[in-house]
């Protein structure tokens, strides 16, 4: 028996509009909504290797102090994708010492999302043999 967790199953964020959130995360990250067999009002979304949950609330602060990071495989391609969707991002910061880049975007509820790229990674934006980035919430489904 191990006393260490296997992975992060999901991360939950508030949303003031679950339908708008579902549409945005589907377009931007390719997540799919999961319909639970319970009476939960939480929006459950997955991409297979990570899950995000969104709890409906009436209102929220515009500037939340938290964020999560998503590692992308093709930096230029993903920024082009964002531009095509009209999603604004901050200036790209480059770290030549490890061939990485990052910037930030915000979802419609102003949740901050860091986009990360590591040019030295061997496959799928994750460390060799890891199967997924530690910066991305992981899970097997909602």
Image: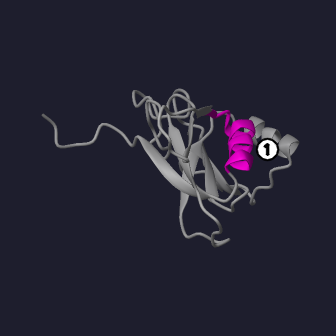
Q: Quadrant of residue 52?
A: top right
What is the basis of the colouring in this image? one colour
Name the residue rendered at 73%, 56% in the picture.
108
Point out residue 38 in the picture as x, y percentages from the top left corner.
Answer: 47, 37
Q: What residue range appears in magenta?
A: 18-32
Point out residue 88 in the picture as x, y percentages from the top left corner.
Answer: 80, 55
In depth, the one of 79 and 16 nearer the eye is 16
Point out residue 75 in the picture as x, y percentages from the top left corner.
Answer: 70, 40
In depth, the one of 53 and 1 nearer the eye is 53
Position of 28 with respect to 36 (left or right) is right
Image quarter hosting the N terminus: top left
Name the residue rendered at 52%, 28% in the picture.
48
In the image, farthest residue toward the front: 39
Position of 66 with respect to 19 (left or right) is left
Point out residue 53 in the picture as x, y percentages from the top left corner.
Answer: 53, 46
Indicate whether residue 29 is drawn in magenta: yes
**Callout 1 crowding tier (Cα within 10 Å): few <14, some 14–19, many ≥20:** some
Indicate whether residue 95 is drawn in magenta: no
Asked if 114 appears above or below 28 in the picture, the reply is below
**Main SS type for the magenta part?**
helix
Q: Which residue position is annotated with label 1?
A: 82
Asked if 71 appears above or below 57 in the picture, the reply is above
In the image, farthest residue toward the left: 1
Q: Quadrant of residue 103?
A: bottom right
Of helix, strand and loop, which one carries label 1? helix
Q: Looking at the image, can residue 70 be seen?
A: yes
Name the residue rendered at 57%, 31% in the picture.
47
Asked if 73 appears above or below 82 in the picture, the reply is above
């Amino acid at each position: 028996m191990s006393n260490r967790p296997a992975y992060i199953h999901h991360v939950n964020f508030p949303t003031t509009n679950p339908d708008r959130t579902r549409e945005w995360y589907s377009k931007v990250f390719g997540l799919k909504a999961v319909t639970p067999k319970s009476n939960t009002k939480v929006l459950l979304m997955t991409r297979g290797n990570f899950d995000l949950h969104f709890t409906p609330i009436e209102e929220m602060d515009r500037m939340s102090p938290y964020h999560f990071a998503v590692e992308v495989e093709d930096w230029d391609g993903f920024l082009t994708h964002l531009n095509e969707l009209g999603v604004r991002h901050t200036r790209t910061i480059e770290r030549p010492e490890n061939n990485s880049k990052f910037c930030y975007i915000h979802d419609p509820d102003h949740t901050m999302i860091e986009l990360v790229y590591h040019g030295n990674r061997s496959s799928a934006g994750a460390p060799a043999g890891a199967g997924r980035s530690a910066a991305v919430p992981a899970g097997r489904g909602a």
